[in-house]
Image (spheres, rainbow, N blue to C red):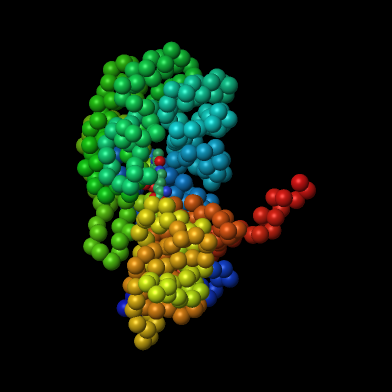
Amino acid sequence: STGFYSKDDGFVYCDDVRVKDVRQQVPESPFYLYSKNQLTENFQAYSDALSGIDSIIGYAIKANNNFLIMKHFREMGSGAVLVSGNELECARAAGYAPEKIVFNGNGKLYHELVYAVKEGVLINIDSEFDLENIRNAAREAGKAAKVLLRINPDVDPEVHPYVSTGIKSSKFGIRNERLQWFLDEVKKDGKALDLVGVHCHLGSTISKVNIFYDATVLMVDFIKEIRAQGFDIRYFDIGGGLGIPYHRDTDEVMPSPSDLIEAVRKLVSELGVTLILEPGRSLVGNAGAFVNTVNGVKSNGQKNFIVIDGSMAELIRPSLYDAYQHIELDQPIPGAERKVFDVVGPVCESADFLGKDRELQVPTAGTGLIVHDAGAYCMSMASTYNLRMRPAEYWVDGGKVKKIRHCDTLAEHLAKFEGL
Ligand code: LLP
């Protein structure tokens, strides 16, 4: 089997390897563990769904920027979607082709834009000042910037406000009433700005494909309007945002990549454009787990706590978005009773929890505890709060456990202060 699942024996597996066995093999705890096969399957689901459509899958590397994971998707034919010059540099180092890279962002810096124009990647215009910066960057680079207009379609993705990006009140994209101003600016200097497409991104953890359909209907109108003014629009970038089923205990269902593509296939093929998708979470989310060791169990008289060695520093989604990620012990504990626990780390604040009110067997110190669906926006959002070191990453590749990132070290930290 592929990915993370538990068998009748009560143990949790990653592909065909027991997570408990992985813990015994690796020196660090906590650590991130990925299933390479699951990554492959997730990418394959998108490429299968896109058959017959001229398209680019642009992996949103902010979701997980592990260099080996980036390379793996690139080897499968992926493009990349980025939000910083550093992400661009890593994507190029991982071998991503400039024609398959999109540079997004509401605050792209001038030097990043010069670099992006030189590399020849697609760049999204997000605002008036962004257009100005891109135009100047193109002049400095001595070549035209290939640009897309990021239009805010004002479609509600029905998600947590922190991950909603395509509604009127959002900081991203250009307002519809301003579209003509942008087109006029591009017309003024065709040598610097080559308008080749439009982009929208609605939000993240989206659970209904009709939301993508509704946005596409609006974007089709924009494309027609822009084409009518003589622009050769060749790309429609529909953004990312497809959710994954985090609630493993319930019968939560999420649309698949194929559901998403089928919802927009007809509209897109009538347009005659290259469709760009920007999936992050749905490519990597379920392929990773955060593996911890139980330090102890305590109670404050009202609540029971499992205290683990991992924390909000390595995985902040529960604290930051009240996000739910499924939690399990990696093995059954014969004879142990079940209790309701908050799962917490050692960090010095009450926001430090990985899960609340979880019914689990009472573990003993040393038991493995797994936070599931930790492939997306977990390691990439890890911090060093409390001087914790960002953890190592491993993947199971062909039944073997391989390290794919070293743990940060305190020596690296101290070196930053040398010779000051
Ligand atoms: N494209 C753009 C322009 C984006 O802003 C994002 C994510 C994506 C694509 C990828 O979206 P995905 O397919 O992964 O949903 N830290 C939050 C999620 C932030 C999403 C930011 N933008 C979390 O942990 O839930």
Asked if residue 375 shows in the view, the reply is: no
Q: Which residue lies furthest to the top in this view?
A: 188
Q: In which quarter of the image is residue 150?
A: top left
Residue drawn at 28 percent across, 25 percent down: 222
Residue drawn at 54 percent across, 31 percent down: 109
Residues 302 and 13: in front is: 302
Q: In this view, does 380 lie above or below 189?
A: below
Q: In this view, does 152 lie above or below 157?
A: above
Residues 245 and 41: in front is: 245
Quadrant containing the N terminus is bottom left
Q: How many labels does the image show?
A: 0
Q: In this view, does 51 lie to the left or right of 388?
A: left
Residue 32 rendering spot, x and y as whole percentages: 49, 62
Q: In which quarter of the image is residue 404?
A: bottom right
Ligand 1: image quarter = top left
Residue 30 rendering spot, x and y as whole percentages: 52, 66
Q: In this view, does 227 lie to the left or right of 398?
A: left
Residue drawn at 54 percent across, 53 percent down: 383
Q: In this view, does 295 lie to the left or right of 12?
A: right
Asked if residue 360 shows in the view, the reply is: yes
Residue 126 rendering spot, x and y as whole percentages: 42, 29
Residue drawn at 39 percent across, 33 percent down: 172
Residue 287 rendering spot, x and y as whole percentages: 40, 59
Residues 34 and 318: in front is: 318
Q: Residue furthest right?
A: 419
Q: In this view, does 268 lie above or below 128?
A: below
Q: Which residue lies furthest to the bottom in this view?
A: 335
Q: In which quarter of the image is residue 253?
A: bottom left
